[in-house]
Amino acid sequence: MRRLVTDTLVIAERNLVRLPRAPELLVAFTVQPIMFVLLFRYVFGGAIKTPGYSYADFLIPGIIVQNIAFGGFVTALGLNEDLHKGLIDRFRSLPMARPAVLAGRTLADVVTNGLSASILVLTGLLIGFSFHTSFLQALAGFGLLLLFGYAFSWVFAFLGMLVSTPEAANSVGFIAVFPLTFISSAFVPVSSMPEVLRGFAEVNPFTVTVDAMRSLWLGAPAHNNVWGAAAWAVAIIAVFSPLAVARYRRAAGQ
Amino acid sequence: MKSYGSVKALVGVDLEVAHGTVLGLLGPNGAGKTTIIRILTTLLKPDAGVARVDGLDVVRDAARLRERIGLAGQYAAVDENLTGLENLTMVGRLYGRTRAAARRRGEELLERFELTDAADRPTKTYSGGMRRRLDLAAALVANPPVLFLDEPTTGLDPRSRLQLWETIEGLVAEGTTVLLTTQYLDEADRLATEVAVIDHGRVIAEGTTDELKDRVGGERLEIRLDDPSRADLAVGALASMSDEPPVADGDLVTVGVRGRAGAIVEAVRRLDGAGVGVEDIALRRPTLDDVFLALTGHAAEADQDEQVAA
C-alpha cells in the first residue's frame, strides 16, 4: 500500500514535470477553454434564453464541466504514447505497484484540471459571471468538479490502453464524450430540446453534474443533484478504473 | 509455449544460461526472440511450461523476480520529455529508493555511460546511441544480476555499436548474466558465450558461435580465376587443403578452410605452382544467412505472418 502511494506520486510527478516541455498540451489547457467561453458568451449567448440567470452565469458551470471531462484526454494520449515507445514495458518490468502508472497519470490530471478550471473561472469573472453562494459552497463546487474530472480521466485511461494509436485515442474520446456534453444542460436549458433528446439529457450524468454545479455556485434548486453527481463520478471510477488496470496488466507494446 | 490465436509464437523452447555468461538468441524478425524475452521478464505469461530466472519462477515469483532483472529493449524506453538524470532518478525511485539515493545512482550511471554532459537535457535531444546508452543505464539502476537485452544495437551506427559492445562486455566481466537477442552473427560472435538459433518459435541449433560456423562449413576461400578454363587445374591444386572437395563455378572456385591461418598464402602458392592466374582471393566468414541456409534451408528473412510474435 505504501509502495502504491509513493509509486503513484513518482509517476504523477513525472507527468507534471514533462508538461511544460510539451507546449502544445499547455495550449490545450489554457487558450482553448478561454476561446470556448468567449465564443459561447458572445456568439451564441444573445440567442439562448436562460430564465432566472444571465447567460454568463448559466454558461460557466456548464462549460467548466465539459472542459474538465475532456481534461483526461492527456491521459489517453500519454498512456498510448508510453505503450508504443516501450515505457509501459519498462514500468511493467519494474518491481513497482501495478496500478501506479495509471493512478499517477490520472492524479496528474487532477492538477492540470485544477489549473484549467481556475483559468476558466477567472475568464468567467471577467465576462460577467459571479458566485451567488457562500465561499464553502463554491469550494464544494470545485471539489465536485475535480472529482468528476478524475472520473473521466479513468474513462480516458481505459480508452488510451484500448486503442492502437494516440490519434485514435483522441478521436474515439472525442466522438464518445463530445455529444454527451452537448445533449445536456451545459449550454442550453434542457426544456428547449426535442422530446427524445430531452429524455436523454435529463438522465445524462453531464446534466446531473452541471445542475449540481449551478446549485453550488449560483444557488439554483439542488434537487439532490449534488449527491447524484458525486454518485455518478464514483460509479464511473468504480467501473473504469478496474477495466483500465486489467487492460494495463495485459498490455503489450507491440 | 506461447500462442496468439492460431499463431504459435513459441513451441517448446528449452534453454539454459550459466551464471556470469552471455546467451545469444539469434534469429530473424518474428522468430520468437522477443516473445522469449517478454516471458522471462514477466511481461507475458506463458501458456504452458516453466521458466526460472535466477532461481525464481517467472509466473509464481514474478514480483520478487522484477527486483533482480534489468531490461533494455529494442525501442529505447526512456521518457523523451524528461532529462537523462530525471529518467534514471524516476526508475530508481520506482525500485523503491529514496529520491536522494536514486539521484545519486543516476549520476553515477550517467558518469559511467559518458552522459554527464547531457544529464540535464531532455532525452529527445539525444542521438540514437546516447538513448540506447541511457536505456541500458536505466536497466542497470538496481544492479541486477540478470540482464535482458533485446536487440541492443539494431539501428545503431558502427561506432555506437562498438561502444555498447564494450559496455556489455564490462558488465559480464563483473559477473552479470546476460540474455541477448540479435539478428547479427557478428554481435553474437563478439558477445555470446553460447548461442541458440531460433526460427518459427523453436530452437533449431545451440552451441558456441564456432560450433555453429562449423555446422555451416566454417570459413571459405573464394578465389576468382583470370581464366575460367583453368578451373579444373585449380581444383586439383587446392584439393588437399580441405576435407571437402573444392567447388568450381565458372571462374569462381570455393574451398572450405575451417579458419586455418595462412590459408590465403597457402592457396596462392599452390595456384602459382600450378600455373593458375588469380584475379581475386578472399576469406569469407559465414553470416547469419549462411547459418540459416544451412540449418533451415531458407534465408534469415522476416516471415510476414510471423511478425505477430515480435
Image (tube, coloured by chain):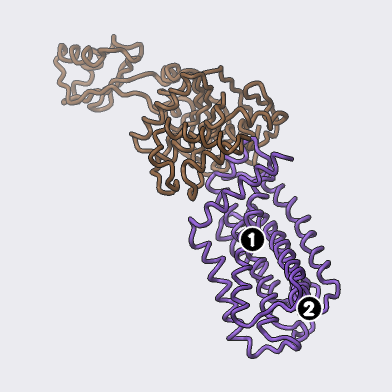
Chain colours: A purple, B brown
Task: Name the one closer to the observer, B111 or A25.
Answer: B111
Image location (x, y in percent) of residue B258 = 35, 14
Asked if both marks, 2 and 1, belong to the same chain, the answer given is: yes
Marks 2/1 in contact by CB < 8 Å: the verdict is no
Q: Is residue A96 above or below residue A129?
A: above
Q: Secondary structure at mark 1?
A: loop
| Residue situated furthest top in the rendering | B240
Which mark sits nearer the N-terminus, 2 or 1? Answer: 1
Image location (x, y in percent) of residue B165 = 41, 28
Q: Which mark is residue A219?
A: 2
Asked whether, in this view, residue B125 is left or right of residue A60, the answer is left
At x 64%, y 45%, the residue is A251
Tell me the amino acid under the disc marked 2: Gly
| Residue corresponding to mark 1 | A72
Tell me the amino acid under the disc marked 1: Gly
Chain of the residue displaying label 1: A
